Image (spheres, rainbow, N blue to C red):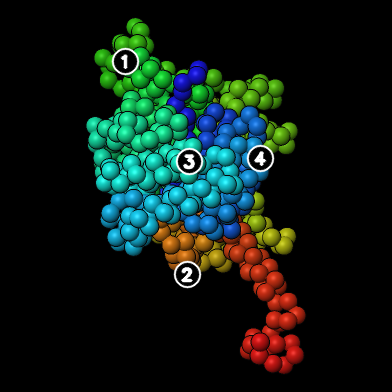
Amino acid sequence: MEDHVKIFDTTLRDGEQSPGATMTAPEKLEIAKQLARMGVDIIEAGFPAASTGDWEAVHTIARLVGTPDGPVIAGLARANRADIERCWTAVRPAAKPRIHTFLATSDIHLEYKLRMSREQVKATVREMVAYARSLCEDVEFSPEDAGRSDPQFLHEVLAIAIEAGATTLNIPDTVGYLTPEEYGALIRGIRESVPGADRVTISTHCHDDLGFAVANSLAGVRNGARQVECTINGIGERAGNAALEEIVMALHTRPQFYGVGTRIDTTQIARASRMVSSITGLPVQPNKAIVGANAFSHEAGIHQDGMLKHHLTYEIMRPETIGKDSSLVLGKHSGRHAFRKHLEQLGYELSDGEIETAFRRFKDLADKKKIVDDRDIVALIDDQLHQPAPIWVLEQVQVSCGNTAIPTATVRLHGPDGEVRTDSAQGTGPVDAVYKAINRVVGQPNVLTEFSIKAITEGIDAVGEVTIRIEEEGNGNGNGHDHPGGDPDRRESRARTYTGHGVHTDIIVAAAFAYMGALNKLIAARQERMRRKAASYTEANTPAFAMDLFGNSAWGRDV
Ligand code: KIV
Ligand code: ZN
């Protein structure tokens, strides 16, 4: 397929700017691998100048996922030398690196945010795009808030970016303000009026504030855009970005109308959606197009009757096209070999040890639940793969509760230095009692900000999946999830959030595992911060600068 729409996935950058969608570096790597498996053309892996953690995540993805036949790995950079340089060092190990630099062009941003004149913006774009191009052959430029920019000025800036060496021009509707007709006309205007526009790829980048992100992106494609920036499940700043799965399936399902497709392996969509939801802790609404739990369910009798006669009566896509086939049923008599084979078909590449653990969990589940289908298996495996390295391990949890009893929980935990500790607590309910008992052992102050529970399948014996979020008490963030247009220093003042998941047929046990996962992430992040602090302290305290707590150097004088 010569002419195709490139899918630029920004789940790890714009998507991570969703409130609370913090991801650790290993989680980002896992998502990047799934995006590569799905065949996305470009992965925007992060904003390297935002924090050391962001730089490291982008660098790791560039090294491990940016293979010669893998996707382009892009990093975001504001239009200044320091950001661009930092971005380049992070994406450089990729076989196909890209620097994505941006500067706002709307009068509102120029006046209130940047305090720059139009002439200054033009000069900066010329200089910074040329600088990025001197480092990297593949340079994308975005005029932030293009949707509210004066079209004449926007065209001038874009022409300068092309002259300076940009290879992709991305047109963000940063605040999700435009309608599909307006956004389509904006793309058409750029293609028709900007000198050199035929030599570069025009890209869409639409936010969903008015619910138009997907419609606007597709209007862009209809008017000649050949790259779409989007995120899995449409996660992102405020109302989110255009949803990758909706864009891809619209192009896939309506080829005559759009006349152009993508290179995405659509059968990987369901898994990507589940993975992102499970890692970020952002649930997918049941009626969400393509990936919602009900997207392929038929409830009304008349629909069910039609479906039984022919699926085309009420279905425009098959669930298996997006990898949502739950037809295979395994039971407690299924063997290791069938289980391993089935995991491979689901797209998992697991080590022998991981398969062994998964098989044990599957057998335990099959003992409790009559029918185990793909939804159960995917939930178990994702849960197993997404658990952080254990610092504290929950060995036992026991609860007594009821309408006349005071909920009381006892927990036994295995600690980092090998000790085993037991404690009990009472709470307003069984989950509260369990969390309080765990807190008594672990002693890490935090606030529970979200608790959600859902059944993986139908039926009274269904597996329950608990997702929770906790915030570290005190402030500070350092996770680099502020909007890139903002001041990176502000990141330090946002509360740190950690998600946890637990999967079990007993929802109290699932809730306990979810809490342990979030707590272990919190502790690991704290340890990592202390490690970095210690390292920078050692670096700064070379003999010439060695000083004690009172500011006296090792030689008894102030330095
Ligand atoms: O929404 C936006 O304007 C962006 C740019 C940085 C591309 O995310
Ligand atoms: Zn954006």
Judge depth for marks 2 and 4 and give the one in front: 4
Disc 2 element: loop
Label 4 vs label 1, nearer the camera: 4
Q: Nearer the viewer, residue 330 or 425?
A: 330
Tell me the amino acid under the disc marked 1. Tyr
Vertical placement of residue 258 versus 32, above or below = above
In the shown orientation, is residue 357 left or right of residue 443? right
Contact (Cβ within 8 Å) of mark 4 with mark 1? no
Provide the residue designation for mark 3: 166
User: In this orientation, does residue 281 appear?
Assistant: no
Instruction: Name the residue carrying label 4.
Output: 64
- Residue 446: percent from the left, percent from the top? 49, 64
Residue position for label 2: 474
Q: Are marks 2 and 4 in contact (CB under 8 Å)?
A: no
Q: Residue at (73%, 81%) from the top-left corner?
A: 544
Q: Amino acid at mark 3?
A: Ala
Q: Which residue is mark 1?
A: 314
